[in-house]
Image (spheres, grey):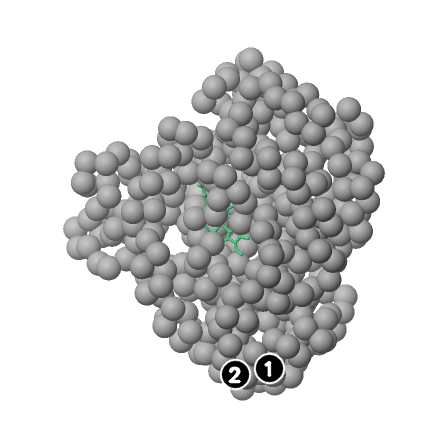
Amino acid sequence: MDEYHLDLNDPEFVSDPYPALAELRERLPVFYDPVWKKVFFARYDDIAALLRDRRLGRAILHVASRDELGWPPPDPLTPHFDRFQQDHMLDNEPPKHTRLRALVLKAFTPARVEGLAGAIERVVETLVDRLAARGGGDLLAEIAEPLPVTVIAELLGVPEADRPRLRPWSARIVKLYELGYTAEEAREANQAVVEFSDCIRALARERRARPRDDLISALVRAEERGDVLTEDELVANCILLLNAGHEATVNGMTLGALALHRHPAQMALAREAAARDDRAFFRAAVEELLRFDTPLPMFERWVLEDVEIAGVRLRRGTEVALLYASGNRDPRRFARPDDLDLRRADNPHLTFGLGIHYCIGAPLARLELQTAFRVLLRRLPGLRVAREPVEYTGGFVIRGHRALPVVW
Ligand code: HEM
């Protein structure tokens, strides 16, 4: 197999990975990276096939021991983080994944998401009111961050007093999903899991005594009906929902706003659609913004049994890295993939994944982003990015901006 090192932490690559991804897609669609020790895939069809293949999984320790895989012992700096990973759905495979996902879905129903539409609209209007009163500001700090954090906290039933701590906890935890982190970051993530878990555990106990109409109460009920959702699993999955529920949505919003700013003709279409409150337009537009600049550009899988794919033999225990952002720009699947086309009809992007781990929060993320762009452009039709270049947070795996200064 070809060998190549993709420097995922190179600031130039992080700020615009698409030219390098296009080159890989054409010249080196599958390669082994000896630094990351993973096999990378850059083409849509290969990524989609691997995501649907049950011989690969997000976890491997349920079928192989650390010794067999030649892994070192668990990191002594992250015992709480590791336990959290073992108990949430994203890092489990069937049968545990099936049980956890089904229990969470029982509480996180389409009706619960639809019921949030009015609340989301009100939160966006309030945030835009504040921004509008000033004439300029940071779209990230003033809208993109507070909206998803407020919505997911509201949905779960986290009280206002605890909410300011959620984003810092979450930001520390997700640092460990980047490739290459420091001992200090590991220690901080572990401590964040301890504090975050204590907060959710206390809330779950309170809701068990006095249930309310929120997701934590619904999860507590799922546990009490005799289904097996242990308290540790309940806590881990709530933390997962809180992290997953806003990290990517925040970045989806600022990446989307920057893409609109850089495509004035498309921005004009969006502005006109916002003026006539055209919700169907924003349904398609958000899909296109999520395809065009993918907030979570890469996910990994373990090979659970030997497989052959794209002419390459992958041995059990190999780790593969799937470049969703590259698949989303593959000309074999998308017509004119480098064009932003907010009316694109055929748009089966990989942004929410595929297969058994397909994003459980996709309907909520879509509703939030559709509402945010529609209301924002109706209220502030002259919205534009104040200056470029825009600074990125540093990581490729959870890719976003440090700030997005805007004026109108
Ligand atoms: C734009 C926003 C979002 C993006 C781009 C996104 C993307 C993804 C992707 C790609 C996966 C699958 C990971 C893989 O293939 O390995 C995933 C899984 C997941 N997402 Fe999202 N997500 C977003 C918003 C949300 C929200 C709002 C929530 C919760 C309210 C959420 C909760 C989850 C959960 C719990 C999983 C794990 C599902 C499983 O393992 O079965 N996500 N997300």
Classify residue 23 as left or right of residue 61.
right
Query: Residue 366: horizontal and vertical position, in percent?
Result: 49, 61
The reply to whether residue 126 is visible in this rendering is: yes
Q: Which amino acid is tagged 2? A: Arg
Q: Mark 2 near mark 1, Cβ–Cβ under 8 Å?
A: yes
Q: Is residue 90 left or right of residue 288?
A: left
Q: From what the image shows, is residue 346 above or below residue 78?
A: below
Q: Quadrant of residue 255?
A: bottom right
Residue under pointer 1: 272
22 with respect to 255 (left or right) = right
**Residue 369: x %, y % from top left:** 51, 65
- Residue 191 visible here: no
- Closer to us: 214 or 194: 214
The residue carrying pointer 1 sits among few (fewer than 14), some (14 to 19) or many (20 or more) residues within 10 Å by Cα, namely some
**Residue positioned 65% across, 36% down in the render:** 46
Give the answer, above or below, for where 110 lies relative to 356.
below
For residue 276, which numbered disc appears in the image? 2
In the depicted view, which residue is nearer to us: 229 or 56? 56
Q: Residue at x 24, y 59 (%)?
A: 213
Q: Residues within 10 Å of mark 2 (few under 14, many from 20)?
A: few
Q: Identify the residue at horizontal 53%, vertical 49% (top origin).
A: 352
Q: Secondary structure at mark 2?
A: loop
Going by the numbered disc 1, the residue's amino acid type is: Glu
Label 1 residue SS: helix
